């Protein structure tokens, strides 16, 4: 009976986490550069019944085979989103495999496809909630005047003076980065990044999220129904356990 509770409880927790992840995807459907998350699960192996004899475990045989799932990982799908024209000077998109580099407020290095930039009070190009945008020579200072960005990422002022070039790179093969707010990913080691090889920078445009709202809603409905089934099954087992306890007590 308790193994049944354990199996169902693991299923409920997994489905609840999946619902949370899917809900977050749906919430960020209009967040520029957002990348879809997926919950990856793994199945429990069949349990073995054991006992201790002289300090050593002895296998008695197979227990009740229980197939359930636990969260193994949350995987981010890095497929590109559609690039849309905005005609806003501070919006910048990368068409290709490169990422913008951001120095966070606490000095960490972050990368992102979200080019929905602004200027802070000091005139630096920033991604709100994350930090300042980096160029080849450090944080990019724009000041109060306008600026232009060419397809190679070179930034020039309104009067044509060269400011810097956007620092654009990508994670090395196999490197994992931690997702933070506003579609950014923290990189633990700058050496985990390598030069992007094929890209074009577009000013006045943004890369949209890669969330497919129809897919997410379908998966959300499936996860909610699965959650309800697990919950109903647990209530049935709980009722059976109470009935069994009452009958034993009456003997």
Image (cartoon, grey):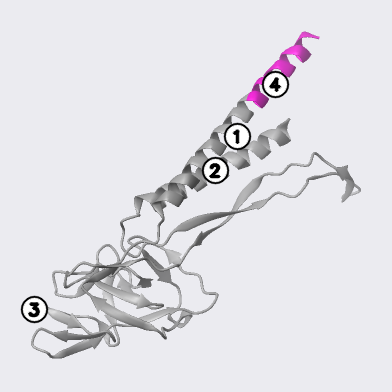
Element class at badge 1: helix
Q: Residues within 10 Å of mark 2 (few under 14, many from 20)?
A: many
In the rendered image, the vertical position of residue 45 relative to residue 167, given as above or below: above
What's the distance in space between the residues labelled 3 and 2, CA to CA? 51 Å
> Residue 87 — which label?
none
* 44 to the left or right of 78: right
Element class at badge 2: helix
Of tags 2 and 4, the one toward the viewer is: 2
**In terms of secondary structure, what is the magenta stretch mainly?**
helix
Q: Which residues are magenta?
A: 236-251
Mark positioned earlier in the residue sequence (1 or 3): 3
> Which residue lies under the disc numbered 1?
230
> Which residue lies under the disc numbered 4?
240
Of tags 4 and 1, the one toward the viewer is: 1
> Which residue lies under the disc numbered 2?
15
What's the distance in space between the residues labelled 3 and 4, CA to CA? 73 Å
Queried whether the magenta region covers residue 248, the answer comes back as: yes
Q: Residue 169, located in which quarter of the rendered image? A: bottom left
């Amino acid at each position: 009976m308790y193994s049944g509770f354990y199996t169902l409880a693991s299923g409920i927790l997994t489905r609840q986490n999946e619902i949370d992840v899917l809900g977050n995807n749906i919430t960020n459907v209009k967040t520029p550069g957002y990348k879809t998350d997926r919950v990856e699960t793994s199945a429990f192996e069949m349990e073995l019944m054991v006992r201790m004899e002289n300090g050593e475990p002895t296998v008695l045989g197979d227990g009740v085979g229980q197939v359930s799932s636990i969260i193994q990982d949350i995987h981010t799908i890095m497929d590109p989103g559609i690039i849309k024209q905005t005609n806003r000077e501070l919006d910048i998109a990368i068409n290709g495999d490169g990422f913008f580099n951001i120095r966070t407020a606490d000095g960490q290095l972050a990368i992102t496809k979200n080019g929905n930039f602004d200027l802070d009070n000091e005139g630096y190009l920033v991604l709100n909630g994350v930090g300042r945008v980096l160029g080849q020579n450090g944080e990019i200072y724009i000041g109060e005047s306008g600026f232009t960005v060419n397809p190679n990422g070179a930034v020039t002022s309104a009067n044509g003076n060269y400011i810097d070039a956007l620092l654009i790179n990508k994670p090395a093969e196999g490197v994992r980065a931690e997702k933070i707010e506003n579609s950014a990913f923290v990189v633990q080691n700058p050496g985990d990044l390598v030069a992007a090889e094929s890209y074009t920078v577009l000013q006045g445009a943004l890369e949209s999220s890669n969330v497919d709202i129809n897919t997410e809603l379908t998966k959300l409905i499936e996860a909610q129904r699965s959650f309800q089934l697990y919950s109903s099954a647990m209530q049935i087992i709980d009722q059976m356990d109470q009935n069994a306890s009452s009958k034993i007590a009456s003997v």
